[in-house]
Image (cartoon, rainbow, N blue to C red):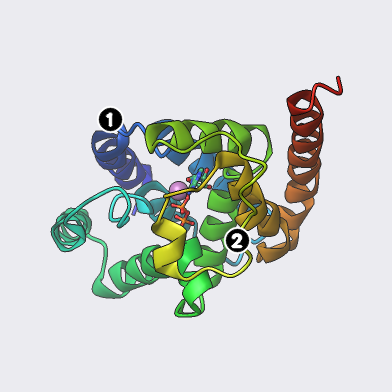
Amino acid sequence: MSNETLTAVHDFARSKMRDDETGHGFDHIQRVVGLADRLLTAYPAADRLLTLTAAYLHDVIDEKLVTDTQAASAEVRDFLSAHDFSATQQDTIFLIMDNMSFHKTLDGTAKPLPLEGQIVQDADRLDAIGAIGIARALYFGGHFGEKIYDPAVAPRTQMTHAEYRNLGGETVINHFYEKLLTLKDLMNTAAAKGLAEHRQQVMLDFLTEFKDEWQAKR
Ligand code: ADP
Ligand code: NI
């Protein structure tokens, strides 16, 4: 397996993700790959090709982005076979993609991730927080018709998967309390926890400023 393989994975992921308008476009994928590669330097035991391939493909079969997840999965399998990924390697990549999502964590149904998957999950979560996280949440909320904020609607504390995906009454600001601010403590690796600290403060400062401006205090 070579850099050529990784280039093919890059091109396949780009063809699938470039039209996304929910904040999961190919720019998100490239940031997740970049963050995963950065985390890899702290974990040399992880398999780089598997980690970066899972990072490139992680949203290609996601329930919120594709209607037919089975067809999308079959297409990914065919692609991986054509590029000589072994059955075991493919199983690892699918294990990662199938179990890294936040909603799996909510449901308690997620299977434990191998080190490669822990790195990809951390990279994906890092891209959901900080300045980029703020921008993506607002972009996602606008796309799905959420209000930016409504002080009368309290953030939910306990949610099932179905409630998490039900955006009726959801606001972007509440999404910070329901998910984004919790991600820092859910990081698997120490390296990601370190990066998350700064991003957490960026979000907290944003929320403080936002509410002050909302109430015309500033
Ligand atoms: P995962 O793939 O880990 O389950 P999601 O697909 O639910 O995560 O969310 C990915 C990103 O989409 C979030 O980090 C956030 O930026 C955005 N997002 C998801 N749900 C909402 C929401 N209700 N309001 C605003 N942004 C959201
Ligand atoms: Ni993602």
Element under disc 2: loop
Residue 100 seen in the current view: no
Residue 185, horizontal then vertical, whole percent: 73, 63
Q: Which residue is label 2 attached to?
A: 156
Q: Secondary structure at mark 1?
A: loop
Camera sees residue 214: yes
Can you tell which quarter of the image residue 97 is in? bottom left
C-alpha distance separating marks 2 and 1: 31 Å
- The residue shown at (48%, 31%) is 139
Task: Identify which residue is drawn at 53% across, 68% down.
Answer: 159
Tell me the quadrant of the picture where the C terminus can be found.
top right
Nearer the observer, 99 or 144: 144
Q: Are marks 2 and 1 in contact (CB under 8 Å)?
A: no
Instruction: Name the kind of residue labelled 1 in the image.
Output: Asp
Residue 139 vs residue 120, the one in the foreground: 139
| Nearer to the camera, 11 or 140 | 140
| Residue identified by numbered label 1 | 19
Position in image of residue 141 (x %, y %): 47, 37
Q: Amino acid at mark 2?
A: Arg
- Tell me residue 148's x, y (percent): 56, 33
Dot 1, crowdedness within 10 Å: few (<14), some or many (≥20)? few
Quick check: 108 left or right of 197? left
Q: Is residue 7 left or right of residue 31?
A: left
Q: Residues within 10 Å of mark 2 (few under 14, many from 20)?
A: some
Q: What residue is rendered at 46% in x and 65% in y?
A: 103
Question: Where the N terminus falls, by quadrant?
Answer: bottom left
